[in-house]
Amino acid sequence: MAFIYFNSIETVIKRFQNKVATGRTTLPITVVYAVVMLLISGLELQSHWIQILMLGVSTYLMVTLNNSNALIRVFSRLVSCSFLAFTLMVPKLQESISGGVVQLLFIIMLLLLFKAYQDRRAVGTIFYAFLCIGGISTQFIQILFFVPFIWILMFTSLQMGSLKVLVASIFGLILPYWFWTAYCFYEGYPEVVLNHILSIAEFGPLTEGLFTPTLFIPLLLVTIIGIIGTFHFLSVSFSDNIKTRMFYNVIMTLFLCSLVFIILQPQHEDILLRLLIITVAPLAAHFFTFTNSWLTNMSFYGVLVAILTITVLNTWFF
């Protein structure tokens, strides 16, 4: 009898994880949770409506990223739910308009890159993708360190590299600076753009900002989930089609780039945590959707409790 009872409990736990991963009410419940947490944090009282709006649009685009590219081969909203839950762990991230812009444009860039998969004539699409990167660089110049890796991914995983596409990407990168430079000359501050570009060579101490508890603890959790999700996908990738595998190669590469960047330059952890969350969300969703062992079900509960605890603590101290 005890054995039967134990097995029935295990079955219930598995059903719970599967219902959360593939349930149609998961996203609405997460959105309600997000609204409650935003209200508790008092962001609406501080007139951060633009940041909240960008978070909402970013969440919708994560839904689109999953649906249009079939990142999860069954019905699931866990990609966008993971993104939203991870982001809310640090309420103070929503204070920054520039951070919201970086996050939003990075997701759009991924959407455009995936749309151009195996299309060597997708000059316009790649132009707009790199226009997003150029826009990000006006707020966060260090994003340019990612560009060589994205070019490599274009020629390898995305299989749409060509001379025309490469030229289009360069024009997309520099176009925002044409308008910004013209505006600064008009206003009489031409040195602003030059100083911003030169700031890419500024490097801080390796330990600067790394031990900020409000950022480090969420960063640690997201990193652990990302690493587990990466190993899991590599071990079961044969179950997905080639196109999906190529998309996850891009996601995993950008995840590793973001992680290495945070380790080397932790003073940028507030922006890089946003990029890390974007890349970890699909990995986390894939892991929790396609695993159902007793251990992974327990870890699912553990992650839910950890996210809620970190969110509450950061909201309280925020």
Image (cartoon, helix red, strand yellow):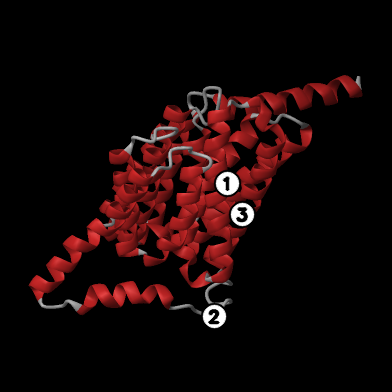
Amino acid type assigned to the residue bearing label 3 in the image: Thr
Give the class, few, some or many, for how many residues have Cα within 10 Å of label 2's Cα (few <14, many ≥20). few
**Residue 261 image-quadrant placement:** bottom right
Q: Can you identify the residue that label 2 sits on?
A: 205
Amino acid type assigned to the residue bearing label 2 in the image: Pro
* Label 1 SS: helix
Image position of 311 with respect to 284: above or below: below
Give the class, few, some or many, for how many residues have Cα within 10 Å of label 1's Cα (few <14, many ≥20). many
Mark 1 → mark 3, Cα distance in angstroms: 12 Å
Q: Can you identify the residue that label 3 sits on?
A: 223
Mark 3 → mark 2, Cα distance in angstroms: 21 Å
Which mark, by number, is residue 252?
1
Identified at 39% across, 33% down, the residue is: 119
Which mark, by number, is residue 72?
none
User: Is residue 268 shown left or right of residue 293?
Assistant: left
Residue 123 position in % (x across, y down): 31, 40
Identified at 64% across, 36% down, the residue is: 287
* Label 2 SS: loop
The mark nearer the N terminus, 1 or 2, is 2
Residue 62 position in % (x across, y down): 42, 38
Q: Is residue 36 visible?
A: yes
Q: Comparing marks 3 and 2, which lies closer to the viewer?
A: 2
The mark nearer the N terminus, 3 or 2, is 2
Q: How many marks?
A: 3
Q: Is residue 318 visible?
A: no
Identified at 43% across, 36% down, the residue is: 114
Marks 1/3 in contact by CB < 8 Å: the verdict is no
